[in-house]
Amino acid sequence: MVNFLDSDSANLEDLEMASWNHSAVQFSLLKSLDIPDKYVPRPELSLDLGTLDLTKLKIGAKQELKPDVCLYPATRRGLSRPTDILRMTEMPLLVIEILSPTQGMYDIKEKFKAYFALGIKSCWLVLPEIENITIYSSTMDSGKAFSRLHGDSEVVDEVLAIRVPLDKIFE
């Protein structure tokens, strides 16, 4: 028996991820950012908003945000024992949001404000359709864009000293 998702009760954030390109780019980012002894990437983790004052932010979330990719120090490698962690209170160093065909950039940029308020150092906005990545940090007023269309060969996050070839992300 096949169960179809009731659109009235569906979580909008879960619906925003349902494209092939989104999934392919997410997988490529996870592979590219898995740097032993330095970083460990994790997909779709729930980040606890805790005591963050949400009244100033234009996001629909109440208790958590779920970025497409989170990057933690390598010390977070492996399973959580003895129990799993349902909502992360330890914030990642980096979050990555991949724009899906049904999302708007305004919503993601509002999420970035929340991420920076939580102490996250760097946020990447990935646009699969035009093979572009824009990196934002809490110290920048605007992002720094990297695109194969403009001849860039790699994305460089100066805050975290990360360099990833664009060909590995958009393969």
Image (spheres, helix red, strand yellow):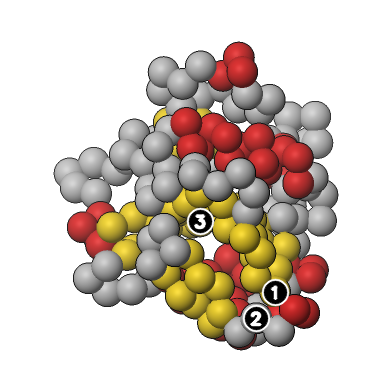
Q: Depth check: 126 or 76 in front?
A: 126
Residue at image mark 2: 152
How many numbered callouts? 3
Q: Quadrant of residue 96?
A: bottom right
Rendering coords of residue 154 (x, y %): 56, 79
Residue at 61% in and 37% down: 111
Q: Amino acid type of disc 2?
A: Asp
Residue at 71% x, 84% y: name it.
151
Q: Which mark is residue 147?
A: 1
Do the CB atoms of the residues marked 1 and 2 lie less than 8 Å apart? Answer: yes
Q: CA distance from mark 3 to mark 2?
A: 22 Å
Dot 3, how many residues are within 10 Å of its Cα: few (below 14), some (14-19), or many (20+)? many
Along the horizontal axis of the image, is 76 left or right of 51? left
Q: Residues within 10 Å of mark 1 (few under 14, many from 20)?
A: some
Precedes in sequence: disc 1 or disc 3: 3
Of mark 3 and mark 2, the one earlier in the sequence is 3
Task: Indicate the amino acid at tag 3.
Answer: Val
Whether residue 22 is visible here, answered yes or no, is: no
- The percent position of residue 7, horizontal first and vertical second, equals 80, 36
Residue 144 vertical position relative to residue 91 in the rendered view, above or below? below
Alpha carbons under labels 1 and 2: distance apart? 5 Å
Q: Is residue 78 above or below residue 166?
A: above
Mark 2 or mark 1, which is nearer the start of the sequence? 1
Residue 3: give x, y in percent of width and height: 73, 46
Q: CA distance from mark 1 to mark 3?
A: 19 Å
Q: Which mark is residue 69?
A: 3
Q: Nearer the viewer, mark 3 or mark 2?
A: 2
Q: Secondary structure at mark 2?
A: loop
The residue tagged with tag 3: helix, strand or loop?
A: strand
At which x and y percent is residue 34? 38, 71
Identify the element where label 1 is drawn. Answer: strand
